[in-house]
Amino acid sequence: MKKEIERIIAQPSEPGMVGDGFRVYNYLPGANISQQRTSPFLLLDFNAEYVFGPSDHIRGVGVHPHKGFETVTIAYKGSVAHTDSSGSSGVINPGDVQWMTAGSGILHKEYHEQAYSKKGGPFEMVQLWVNLPKKDKSTPAHYQAITQEQMSKVVLPGDKGIVNVIAGTFNGTKGSAQTYSPVNLFDIKLKKGGEITTNLPSEYNTAILLVNGKAKVNGEIANEHSFVLFKNAGEEITITAIEDSVLLVLSGEPLNEPIASYGPFVMNTQQEIIASIEEFQSGKFGVLN
């Protein structure tokens, strides 16, 4: 049975700036979509392609905390460097994914990679926040760095496209990321006329972001930068590219737990939020200049 589409949401009218390096359109939560409706997915920011000019000033976001969830950064164009209070650092280049589990708390900063910043050019990224189950919110912070070369892939016949399986399973191919609850995350690139069909559990919260292009999704047309939200009914999804297209499919089992969120802290109760802020203020997340 085909998975039913609840609605197709157009690109938000105005982008916002996160720091001075990320010009993002916010899709989740928003447009009357609650965090419970899309659990375990809490937030989706999309930096649609934007050309940053050359700069000696390194644009980005300064030191900030995270606790109780995971951030997933997917790079399409441009490069991002990051550093955290555990001493970890790295660079995300086009095709790479950084999956950061904030868990019990971490300080973090992310900014345009130096060589990219000096040269400038097109920049396109997605950041997705994935909630952690209550039992895992105190797990130590850590990373999964998944490069384009390490990514699990499904190549379509006739050179019609490729599916990068970031997490979960796509038609039998298991993704590279380890997750704390069942999550499917697919980066799909289709050439004009390319088509894929896959099945995702009816009870999972499922959506598609049209990163680029135009496609038909279960018979309905989705334009560039639109967001397709599915009902919790049916399993089968068929995507046909009307023009060369890039799509991000996200589907996950709802956690069905209370959500208490305050900025970069996501817990289950307000008391836990207050405790998290106190931990941050007392230096328990470490130090990062």
Image: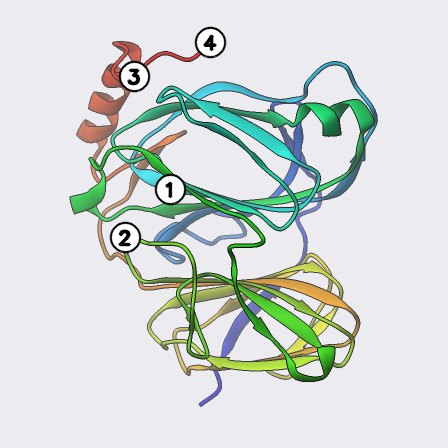
Mark 3 to mark 1: distance in Å?
Answer: 17 Å
Mark 2 to mark 4: distance in Å?
Answer: 30 Å
Residue position marked by numbered label 4 in the rendering: 289
Mark 1 to mark 2: distance in Å?
Answer: 10 Å
What's the residue type where badge 1 is placed? Glu
Dots 3, 1 in contact, CB < 8 A:
no
Q: Mark 3, mark 2: which one is toward the viewer? A: 2
Residue 91 horizontal side relative to residue 65, left or right:
right
Residue position marked by numbered label 1 in the rendering: 70
In the rendered image, residue 287, in percent from the top left (x then y), is placed at 36, 11
Looking at the rendered structure, the secondary structure element under dot 4 is: loop
In the rendered image, residue 172, in percent from the top left (x then y), is placed at 42, 78
Going from the N terminus, do you reach mark 2 or mark 4 first? 2
Q: Residue at x 30, y 33 (%)?
A: 141
To which quarter of the image does residue 136 belong? Answer: top left
Callout 2 crowding tier (Cα within 10 Å): few <14, some 14–19, many ≥20? some
Given residues 3 and 69, the one toward you in this image is 69
